[in-house]
Image (cartoon, rainbow, N blue to C red):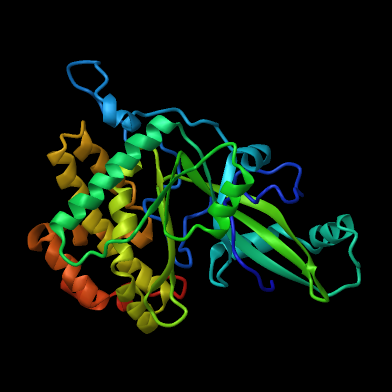
Amino acid sequence: MGNRKKRSNTNKKGKENRLPKKEKEIVLPVEDRIYTRRGFVAASALAGITLLMKGHNRDPYVGEWEFLKQRPPRYPSFTRDIINNEFVKLGQRNQINENSPYLARLKKLVPDSLVNSIIKRSNWDPKGDYSITPLEGKSAISDSQKYYNQVLDYCKKTIKFSHSKISGLTHHPIKWTRIENPVTPEDTFSYVSDAHQRGFIGNRYILDFEIGVTNKAHPEQSVYAPIYHISQSGAFVYLKKSKDDDTLGDWYFFIPTDRFALVAPFSEIIPLSTFSSLEDYKNKVGRYTALVADETFAEGLSYVLSSELANDLNIPNGFEIITGIQNRLKNDPRYQFVPQSITWIQKNGVQNAFDLYSESAEKYMTALGINLEKELTSPRER
């Protein structure tokens, strides 16, 4: 599959050509994203973490904590029409990494006959030389202004709290952005071409996989065809290094208006300050191994900080919700070392953890008693 840039989301491909008439929502194991940490990717929906309220039936989630209520999903599943009409794309498309399991799945779903159909329907030269590019993007759906305001207020509190606990965090300017629906052409441009330094807040997001078909002799003859999507819960951050060195260049992130928001602002914003450590380690051991180290540090630190803040703010059932989120990560191999990270941080403190990881991701993992290069033995894991 050829070359291309990135864009939208899970079975999501924008509205720009709908090929398959009927699509199923395919749920694959959540994997690494090129520089996209998918903070808290429990691949099922937000309905988990059931809390039993003892002794009374009064709803504890009122006022500023109303976003913590367990709400039914807006749609039981996402059809292509819903994705085209309700979801908005965030940031540019990314070409799918050659080691991604998504690539193999995409190839199976894109036979030559489908590509030929695209060319024929576009009235292009059937004998032309075309590049076929596998693409991945993210799209999100809006939520009410009320929940946006509540989550935004909490996000600002987490940032203030993080800086009070950790010296050395970078103060990043964040353009807080509510996912709007319907979206104006101006919004669409902002979400896609001007996503840099945005903190998007919305109901949830999806991974959208598509192919780009381009006539090499006539590059203006180019079209994107949606193939399938994967519905996600949780948050994500997109990180891209500078063109000049290994420092942070482009970035943006997404926070959902649900219970994952209690931890997501920590796990998605703190890595903006430790990006150089991730890059240094990636240059030494490879992308996946470095991302595992980054998740180990970020999710461990996020658990400790969010638990402390939940106590300070008297968030109803805050600790139980946060612990439930952490427990849902156990089956994802990228998070297998987070429990050791939590234990180390609780013993040594968040400042020491931040300082050590900022100095060296490898030294941080060694302090946990973990040799990632030995622990991650398979080629896919490495």
Left of 6 or right of it: where is 377? left
Q: Nearer the viewer, residue 223 or 73?
A: 223
Q: Give the residue at x 72% y 51%.
A: 16
Q: Is residue 48 visible?
A: no
From the image, which quarter does the C terminus lie in?
bottom left
* 267 with respect to 142 (left or right): left
Q: Residue at x 47, y 56 (%)?
A: 30
Q: Position of residue 73 (x, y in %)?
A: 48, 31
Observer able to see residue 143: yes
**Residue 223 placement: quadrant:** bottom right
Name the image quarter holding the N terminus. bottom right
Q: Residue at x 43, y 32 (%)?
A: 145
* Along the viewing direction, whichever of 244 and 280 lies nearer the viewer: 244
Residue 199 picture location, percent across and down:
40, 51
Quick check: 144 above or below 208?
above
Image label count: 0
Q: Position of residue 290 (x, y in %)?
A: 35, 73
x%, y% of residue 220?
Answer: 79, 67
Residue displayed at 70% across by 47% down? 15
- Horizontal side of 96 relative to 379 (left or right) equals right
Q: Furthest-front residue in view?
A: 186
Q: Nearer the viewer, residue 218 or 122?
A: 218
